[in-house]
Amino acid sequence: MCIDGTCGVVEDINLRLTILRDLDGTVHYIPNGNVTKTSNMSKDFARVNMNVGIGYDADLDKVVQVVNRVGIELAADEQWKEKIKKAPEFLRVDSFGDYSVNIKILGDVEPLQQWAVTGEYHRRLKAAFDAEGIEIPFPVTVVKLMNEGAEQKPA
């Protein structure tokens, strides 16, 4: 649940306060009189919602196949299938970044399972991208020495 931007698991609700514990373990005490907006992250289902960057040289059709295959395999896995309502799958090319083409992946899972399923999907997708030669780019910094080649004097 999110209350006015503070998200966590509801630990208690009483007449005066709602108590949330966030993912870091921090406990938030929110006076009910101050609540103007709540967002329920676990009603009926939750969502795997991922943005993944791929290299500009990647074959997009191959990326779509790998992304969808990994989602189907995860949803069929005995350990994970009860947690997944709809396998994570490629939704769209979301944006063009400085270093990557960013794709959106969505899937539906049982309430409060989105973090576990997303983590396992990330692990499997990284392994599949490595095996298929699909690059996940990252920024590279080039350092240039200004006095390169100049004669060095002993100190």
Image (cartoon, rainbow, N blue to C red):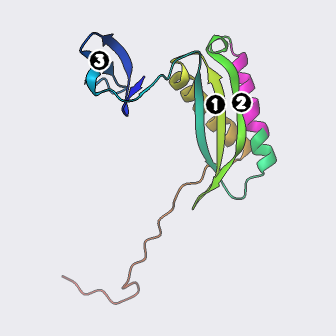
Helix, strand, or loop for circle 2?
helix
Q: Position of residue 91 (x, y in %)?
A: 71, 39
Instruction: Kindly tell me whether residue 28 is visible in this rendering.
Output: no
- Cβ–Cβ below 8 Å for labels 2 and 1? yes
Q: Is residue 57 left or right of residue 145?
A: right
Mark 1 highlights which residue? 124
Using the image, tell me which numbered label, if any, was put on residue 19: 3
User: Which three-letter amino acid code belongs to the residue tagged 2?
Assistant: Val
Helix, strand, or loop for circle 3?
strand
At 27% from the left and 23% from the top, the residue drawn is 33
Res. 84 image quadrant: top right
Would you place residue 132 above or below residue 59 in this image? Answer: above
Q: Earlier in the sequence, mark 3 or mark 1?
A: 3
Using the image, tell me which numbered label, if any, was put on residue 111: none
In this rendering, the label closer to the viewer, 3 or 1: 3
For the N terminus, the quadrant is: top left
Q: Position of residue 38 (x, y in %)?
A: 42, 26
Q: Earlier in the sequence, mark 2 or mark 3?
A: 3
Instruction: Kindly tell me whether residue 136 is visible in this rendering.
Output: yes
At 61% from the left and 14% from the top, the residue drawn is 83
**Which residue is at the front of the view, 73 or 49?**
49
**Label 3 – label 1 distance at C-alpha:** 35 Å
Q: Earlier in the sequence, mark 2 or mark 1?
A: 2
Q: Which residues are magenta?
A: 65-77
